[in-house]
Image (spheres, rainbow, N blue to C red):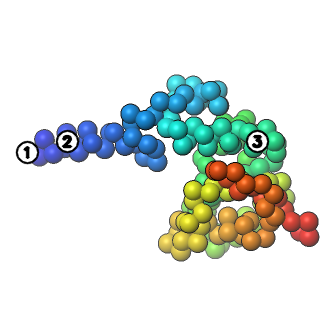
Amino acid sequence: LVCFLLIWTFAILYQYPYREEARDHITYPLAEVFPRMAGIYGGEFIFRKSQTLASLHRTHGHAYTVLPAYPLAHYLTNSIPPIPIDWAHNAEMDYARNRDWMLRELHTHTQVVFIEKDKLSQLADTSGYGSALALYVRTQWQLIEENEYFEVYKQAATE
């Protein structure tokens, strides 16, 4: 019985990868967007979101970052991350302790910030998985563009 339950559980969970659609919908070759993802497939959502990120990178250049989290975005666009984190959740970067340093890095090295729209409801989460850095950008920077997947901000002229 235990063996059956383990096999059944694995078979069910195997069909739903972390942060992705059901396995039978993962049919989009991500290398069409980012050649560095050769051999990797995604669902329609991640494929379209990746296309949008690639387009934003072409439009706005290398001095961008994605908040709260788009791991490997700079690897995929062959650019150097302007801030030293890929996962800008409060718990991941100890925001309370590193706030001033992180804001200085953001202001010094970043021209535009792409904020993931599908994560907006999580930004104010106080459990540690919110992103005070993304909230700061949304309130202190200027919204210059918006699409289905991202809000695009640049530093306000007074800063």
Q: Which residue, given by chain and number where applicable, does mark 2 sit on?
A: 8
Amino acid type, label 1: Leu
Of residues 19 and 48, the one nearer the viewer is 48
Q: Does residue 101 show up? A: no
Of residues 8 and 96, the one nearer the viewer is 8
State the CA–CA distance, disc 1 to disc 3.
Answer: 52 Å
Furthest residue toward right: 158
Discs 1, 3 touching: Cβ within 8 Å: no
Which residue appears at 19% of the width and 39% of the height? 7
SS state under label 1: loop
* Residue 77 percent coordinates (x, y): 71, 37
Quarter location, residue 25:
top left
Amino acid type, label 3: His
- Which circle marks residue 57 in the picture? 3
Q: Residues within 10 Å of mark 2 (few under 14, many from 20)?
A: few
User: The C terminus appears in which quarter of the rendering?
Assistant: bottom right
